[in-house]
Amino acid sequence: MYLSRLILNPRSRQVRSELARPYQMHKTILRAFPETLPTAERVLFRLEEDPRTGMLMLLVQSQHSPDWGHLLNGKNYLRLVESLPAQIAENPSTKEVNLQLSAGQPLCFRLYANPTKKIKVEGKKNGQRVGIFKEEDQHQWLARKLEAAGTSLLRANTSQSGNIYGQQNKAGQKNKLTMLGVRFEGVLQVIDPQALLQAVNNGIGSGKGMGFGLLSLGPAR
């Protein structure tokens, strides 16, 4: 697995445009990978602000090593910050990660997700997916998702990030999307390492093409 960090230039017109259209940002990111990626492979991403520097960071997780050359050349690319603090050696940067997970292990986690549920709608076979807005219900949604991912939720904080807007092309029609964004941070305990690894690879919840679902893990403090 590979993790990439790209520090974006917020003064760039294209960056501002793609911040408002995250699915377009997803398409830009995918240009760093072969067109023939396996159907089941997920390229996940999340936007964050560095708490120390205030810089806008794009985190990308992939199974293939990316080639970010298209960001540095040509017209259609996300502009990166060129002048960086001395402690930041390169931009973009990519590192290979081999997660070592074991049963009983406590881990810190971070997740930007789109908590949803399905409700029955007359005339619709699969019902309708709607957002979960109450914080208590969001916490229960997270606990269920992490349990399915082979872990037990020990504690978590939630912060509401507002709505993300996008567009879906389906059957030749363009449908506008409004998706609720919630940031979760906390501590989990590994129960099934293989199930957790699969969840990390696949992402959690819906809206992965809109910047949701990337589960980041680290040593528990």
Image (spheres, grey):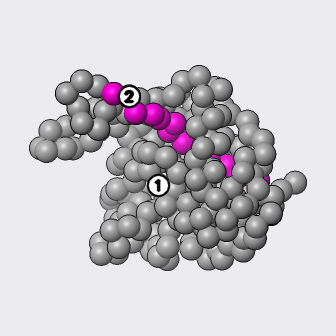
- Circle 1 Cα neighbour tier, 10 Å, few/some/many (<14 / 14–19 / ≥20): many
Q: Mark 1 — residue?
A: 79
Q: Which residue is drawn at 60% across and 28% down?
A: 137
Question: What's under tag 1, amino acid-wise?
Answer: Arg
**Residue found at the very far right of the displayed protein:** 221
Quadrant housing residue 3: bottom right
Of tags 1 and 2, the one toward the viewer is 2
Q: Which residue is drawn at 81% across and 58% down?
A: 106
190 lies above or below 89: above
Q: Principal SS element in the magenta part?
A: strand
Q: Are marks 1 and 2 in contact (CB under 8 Å)?
A: no
Question: What's under tag 2, amino acid-wise?
Answer: Ile
Front position in the image: 73 or 214 = 214
Answer yes or no: is residue 16 visible.
Answer: no
- Tell me where the magenta segment starts and ends, as one range: 108-120
Q: Is mark 2 on a helix, strand or loop?
A: strand
98 lies above or below 141: below
Q: Closer to the N terminus: mark 1 or mark 2?
A: 1
Image coordinates of residue 177 in percent, x first then y, are 33, 33
Left of 121 or right of it: where is 205?
A: right
Does the segment drawn in magenta span residue 127? no
Image coordinates of residue 10 in percent, x first then y, are 53, 43
* Rendered image: mark on residue 118: none
188 lies above or below 143: below
Instruction: Give the quarter of the figure containing the C terminus.
Output: bottom right
Image coordinates of residue 215 in percent, x first then y, are 61, 54
- Circle 2 Cα neighbour tier, 10 Å, few/some/many (<14 / 14–19 / ≥20): few
Q: Residue at x 27, y 41 (%)?
A: 168
Q: Distance between the residues labelled 1 and 2?
A: 41 Å
Q: What element carries label 1?
A: loop
Q: Mark 2 — residue?
A: 119
